[in-house]
Image: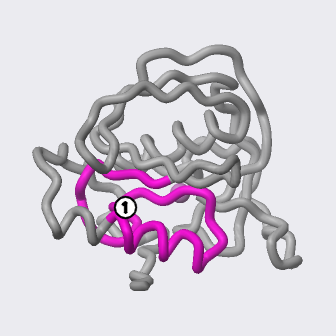
Amino acid sequence: MAVRKIRVLGDEILRKACKPVPEMTPRNAQLIEDMFDTMYENNGVGLAASQVGILKQIVVIDIEDGNQYVLINPEILEEEGTQTGQEGCLSVPGKCGVVTRPNKVKVRALDEHMQEYILEGEGLLARAIVHECDHLKGQMYVDLVEGELMDAAAEEGEEEAE
Ligand code: NI
């Protein structure tokens, strides 16, 4: 298990665009494993590679629906509806804010074996997919917050952070 250091808001690497991943290498496989370790260690539901300082188009998501999603070079194909709710981010510790996102998304990505697949997400999964894909473009949810950033609830496990 290898937990990597999470970059926080203000670190310029978070504002840079990530590059497509051309092939699976031992290095990339290790990065994906470490991203899951880092996400779980910090009670997150999603993590983008740029959040651990690597500018590659790799996202991991686990919203506790029984799946560990790996999205490499993801491309959002369709968005439908809207949802407005609280969102957090492991790169903005202790904070949350209200963000409107699509309620459903369809995304095309490569899995950890570089096999293309289509993932359709609704609700929290849609929110996580869009939030993480934004990270790959150097975008952060704090830019989209409606009203003020708030302090996240103190209770352990209360917040979902991406
Ligand atoms: Ni985030």
Compared to 4, does 13 lie above or below? Answer: above
Q: Residue at x 34, y 56 (%)?
A: 15
- At mark 1, the secondary structure is helix
Which one is nearer the viewer's eye here, 67 or 52?
A: 67
* Range of magenta residues: 32-60
Residue 80 horizontal/vertical position (percent): 62, 14
Residue 9, given in percent of the width and then of the height, sits at 48, 68
Q: Nearer the viewer, residue 37 or 141?
A: 37
Report the residue at 27% width, 35% height from top. Answer: 115
* The C terminus - image quarter: bottom right
**Residue 56 drawn at (x, y percent):** 24, 55
The stretch drawn in magenta includes residue 145: no
Question: Along the horizontal axis of the image, is 29 left or right of 92?
Answer: left
Q: Is residue 11 left or right of residue 152?
A: left
Instruction: Assign the N terminus to one quadrant of the image.
Output: bottom left
**Residue type of the residue flagged with mark 1:** Leu
Query: Dot 1: few (<14), some (14–19), or many (≥20) neighbours within 10 Å?
Result: many
Q: Position of residue 125 (x, y in %)?
A: 64, 39
Residue tagged 1 = 14
Front residue (pair 97, 124) = 124
56 inside magenta stretch: yes
Seen at 67% across and 45% down, the residue is 145
- The image quadrant that residue 155 belongs to is bottom right
Say above or below: 8 vs 13.
Answer: below
Q: Is residue 138 above or below residue 104?
A: below
